[in-house]
Image (cartoon, helix red, strand yellow):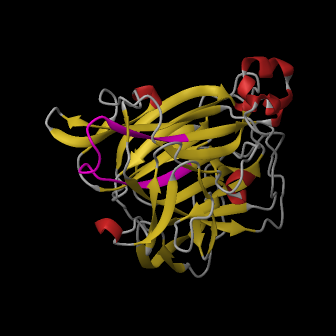
Amino acid sequence: MKRSILLAVFLTFTLGTAISGQADEPFSQGFETDTSGWIDFGGTITRVPSGTSGIPSSKGGFHAEAGVSGSGIFTRFGEYRGTWPGFVKQFLDVYIDPAKGNLDDGWWLDNALTCSEFARTDPATLLALPNCDPAGGSGPLGWLEAGGVGAKKILCGGTTEGWAIAADADGAGNPSGGGVCITAPGWYTILSSWVESSSNTGNPDTDTIDRNTFIFDSNGVQIYENLNPKQHLLKNAGGNRYAWLNAGGSVPQRFAGLLAIDNSVLLVPSVAASADHLQCYDVKKSTKLDPKPIVNLDDQFAVRENVQVKEKAELYCTPVDKNGEGIGNPDNHLTCYKVEGYKPNRKITIENQFGQQSFELKDSELLCVPSLQTDVQDTKKGGHDDDDDDD
C-alpha cells in the first residue's frame, strides 16, 4: 500500500536535535523587574512582590496591581505590527476574586489587530473599513478589529457572588447568558487568538481569519471558549495592536479596586513554525541500521530510557510548497523509524493554519530524525512505478 502524508510542522521530533513548530514571544512581561511595556491610560500599574494583598504571583516573585478605573492601562506588546505573521495570540493572567467589588461592577479586557498594508492603502477597502485609514485617527497601522472579554459581578446561579466573564459574542458586559461564572478566587489566563480559517483555499479574495477567545484556570484547564469564524479577509489582517484593561464599556458600574495581573505575552509563529511544510512518504526496501539504535527520549509527556529504535526506515519527509507559500529550507528532511510505544493518556487542543482541533493521543509510534539527503535515484521500471510492497 502506498501512502503520502502532508505534515504541517507544528510537531516536535526528538533525537538530540529538535525540529519544532514552537512560537516566538516578541513580547513577554512577567513584572519580575519592572512594568515596561504597560502604559498608564488614566489608570495605574504598580509592580508588587508575591504575597501582596494575600495574592501569590502567578509565576516568579512579582506581579502587578492594575487600577483600571477611567481608561485603565494598555500594552502595545512592544510595538504595533502591521504584517500578518500566521497567527496572533495575546495572553494575560488575571487574579479574579469573587470577594472583591460590588454587584454590577464591571471591567473589560479589549484586544485588537492592526490592518495590513493592503487594507491601509486600497481605496475600496478603506471605504468598507474606515478604521484602517492611517489618516482617520486610528493610528499609523489602523485597527481591523477589537474584541475581548467583559467581566461583571453578579450572583452566579442566583445565589453566589462571582465574576461572570464572556467574550463580546456571548454578551460581554452582561455575560450571565453565554459566559462562565467564576466563584473560586485564583489566577485565570485569558487568551485572545487570531488564526487563519480552516476553510481557506489560498484565494486572497475569500480566505479569512477567525478570532477565538479562551479562559483557563490556574491548572491550565480550559473553562471557557468563544469561537468567531471568518471575521475578516486574511488579506486585510495585520499584526498585533493592543491589550487594553479598563473599567469602561456598557457595564452599569466601574470596578474601582485593583486587579492583580501577570504574564502578559504575545505569541506568533517562530521561523521554524512558518518555514516549511513536509510531505511524508512510505518507505520500502530500506537497508537496516546495524546496530539497532537505543536512545533516551524526554518530551513533554514522559522521560523514557533505553528505547529501542527499529532498524528500517518507515517514512521519509521532504519539504513541500503548499499553495504557493514557498520552501524556506530545501534541506530540511526527516527520516522516521518505529519505536517502542508509549501511551501518554492525554487529550490536547491545537491550533494551526487549518484551524483548531482536539484529540486524544494514542501510542507513540515513530521517531523522526533530521537527515541529510545525499543521493536521489529514479526507480521507475518500464515507464511505471515499482509499487511492490516491502515486508
Query: In the displayed structure, does residue 361 sit left or right of residue 42?
Result: left
Asked whether residue 197 is in view, the answer is no
The quarter of the picture where residue 326 lies is top right
- Determine whether 94 is above or below 172 in the image: below
- Determine whether 379 is above or below 197 in the image: below
Query: In the displayed structure, does residue 69 sit left or right of residue 79?
Result: left
Asked whether residue 190 is in view, the answer is yes
Looking at the image, which residue is at 29% across and 46% down? 101
The quarter of the picture where residue 345 lies is bottom left
Q: Is residue 293 magenta?
A: no
Looking at the image, which residue is at 29% across and 67% down? 54
Q: Main secondary structure of the magenta part?
A: strand
Q: Which residues are magenta?
A: 90-110
Judge by depth and name the residue closer to the eye, 68 or 29.
68
Judge by depth and name the residue closer to the eye, 324 or 219.
219
Q: Position of residue 382 (x, y in %)?
A: 83, 42
Q: Quadrant of the C terminus?
A: bottom right
Query: In the displayed structure, does residue 335 sit left or right of residue 345?
Result: right
Looking at the image, which residue is at 70% across and 43% down? 239
Q: Position of residue 245 (x, y in %)?
A: 50, 46
